[in-house]
Amino acid sequence: MSKASALVMGVGPSQGLGAALCRKFAREGLFVYVCGRSKEKLEDVCSEIIAEGYDAIPIVADLTDKDDIDQMTEIIVENESIIELAVYNAGNNRMESFLDMKPENFEGMWRILCYGAFLSSQSILRLMLDQKEDASNGAYIPIVKGADGSLTNPFLQQVAKNISNSEYHQIFYDQFLGADIGRVVDDVSTDLAAGI
């Protein structure tokens, strides 16, 4: 089942902005990918979110490394997540006068603030566009609010609207969905597989 998700990149300690964003998005009902360089800090943030009854998983990645970003994207795809929003929060806290800054320090800041944002944005935007194309082609019915806008088949648009409005779709997807959308999930899956 596809999950409406948020990806927060550049998460550090639990008292930081990235962690606060992760908690906020989890409380709004999104599955949260908590991404940063420190496995221990990421696990702490995820543990806090899970303790509140929400879902989050850590992704350790150096956002200036394309291979790490590709791996981050692959984790999202493997988890069948629909990225609703992505935040690039990576940065560094160098309190240094511009006139005193060494070129290698500026280059390091540029790699994190600019180059990492470029690599991450490019990868996540491609993923989001692929997901939108899949939805509009009827490859799946995304179960997030507003998904009906990407679908062209009127029946699938209605199914997406009904799922979005359903109180039960996240907890009782298989058991109670039929009553909310007017047919059972397996019928929809059969239609999708048959290309209807």
Image: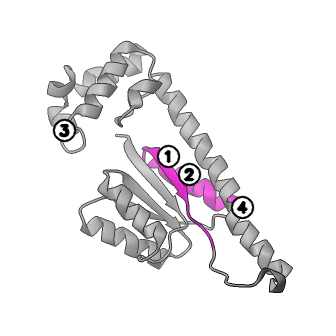
Please tell me the numbered disc located at residue 73: 2
Q: Is residue 194 above or below residue 112?
A: above
Q: Is residue 75 magenta?
A: yes
Whether tag 3 and tag 2 are in contact, CB under 8 A, the answer is no
Residue 7 location (% of width, % of height): 48, 55
If the image is split into quadrants, where does the C terminus sit?
Answer: top left
The total number of labels drawn is 4
Is residue 64 shown to the viewer in this render? no
Whether tag 1 and tag 2 are in contact, CB under 8 A, the answer is yes
Question: Helix, strand, or loop for circle 1?
Answer: helix
Is residue 87 shown to the viewer in this render? yes
Question: Between disc 3 and disc 1, whose residue precedes?
Answer: 1
Provide the residue designation for mark 3: 167
Q: Is residue 34 magenta?
A: no
Q: Amino acid at mark 3?
A: Glu
* Eye-nearest disc, 1 or 4: 4
- Separation of disc 2 and disc 4 at Cα? 19 Å
Magenta residue span = 65-91
Residue placed at 39% from the left, 33% from the top? 142
Provide the residue designation for mark 1: 77
Q: Amino acid at mark 2?
A: Thr
